[in-house]
Image (cartoon, helix red, strand yellow):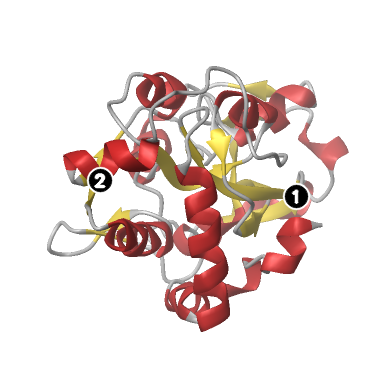
Amino acid sequence: MKKMLAMLLTAAMTLGMLAGCGSKDSGEGGNASSESDKAYVQDKGTLVIGITDFEPMDYKDENGDWIGFDADMAKAFAESLGVEAEFVEIDWDNKILELDGKTIDCVWNGMTLTDEVTSSMACTDAYLNNAQVVVVPKDVADKYQDEDSLADLNFAVEAGSAGEAEVSARGLNYTAVTAQAAVIDSLMAAAMIGEGTSYADLTYTISLNTEEYGVGFRQGSDLAEELNAFFDQSYEDGTMAACAEQYGVQAALVSADSAEE
């Protein structure tokens, strides 16, 4: 995502950007596998995690290692299974194909629990709250403080993302060529734009929705419930909160009780 942001900002005049990936379901059903996904992963010794470069969820440190809230939690979950975490960058629009083709074992990248996602994957309960926000240059931000003011803008969004869905649902224009604004995840916006960042001339104005993040496995996978139990334990023992505080996402945490409501 970070690479796409830089590309759009450079090539698309005033601004550019894309979004992360909203609704909630266990995602069970569909073409359930007769094989235990947990056994499959443990047998091969790796949990292959489909991601994009999305700070503060998954991004590389100065040594080229994947870090972030999602990356660190994924490593801990893999360790609990007795396997190694392997991170693979994917085309976000092809995440379901990658999962079904077994080139990855899960999608764990600030993924919004959309209807498409929950009907195509076995998803965990929500573990973070999020929103899609409008990003514009600071010098014109005062013009775009409500949804009615967005009608004449061209938006940059990521294909297959929750941002694209929100823009499309409102009948707004979106393009990667002459973008004047973008719709991205609020967590990404907080981490990547504004004072002290590479995009200090940008800001975000209004939220278009509220949504939740979850992790997706293959349909019928027993790893979704395994990860739910891991999340519950991590929430109770404080390790999730510590990780969230490290990456500045603690305000978005969903408690185990909230997830069940």
Q: Residue furthest right?
A: 148
Mark 1–mark 2 distance (CA, rounded to whole Å): 36 Å
On-image quarter of the N terminus:
top left
The percent position of residue 70, horizontal first and vertical second, equals 42, 57
On-image quarter of the C terminus:
bottom right
Q: Residue at (64%, 66%) from the top-left corner?
A: 252
Q: Are marks 1 and 2 in contact (CB under 8 Å)?
A: no
Q: From the viewer's side, name the closer residue of 184 and 210.
A: 210
Above-or-below relation of 16 to 214: above
**Residue 50: quarter of image:** top left
In the structure shown, which secondary structural element does the residue marked by tag 1 occupy? loop
In the structure shown, which secondary structural element does the residue marked by tag 2 occupy? helix
Q: Residues within 10 Å of mark 1 (few under 14, many from 20)?
A: some
Q: Residue at (44%, 23%) from the top-left corner?
A: 34
The three-letter amino acid code for the residue at tag 2 is Gln
Q: From the viewer's side, name the closer residue of 5 and 218.
A: 218
Residue carrying label 2: 42
The percent position of residue 17, horizontal first and vertical second, equals 49, 39
The three-letter amino acid code for the residue at tag 1 is Thr
The percent position of residue 240, horizontal first and vertical second, equals 49, 73
Q: In the figure, is residue 225 to the left or right of 146?
A: left
Q: Residue at (75%, 57%) from the top-left corner?
A: 260
Q: In the figure, is residue 193 to the left or right of 11?
A: right
Q: Which mark is on residue 210?
A: 1
Q: Is residue 15 visible?
A: no
Q: From the viewer's side, name the closer residue of 196 and 260.
A: 260
Query: Which label sits in the foreground, 1 or 2?
Result: 2
Q: Is residue 59 visible?
A: yes
Mark positioned earlier in the residue sequence (1 or 2)? 2
Q: Residues within 10 Å of mark 2 (few under 14, many from 20)?
A: some
The percent position of residue 7, horizontal first and vertical second, equals 35, 35
Q: Residue at (63%, 32%) from the top-left corner?
A: 118
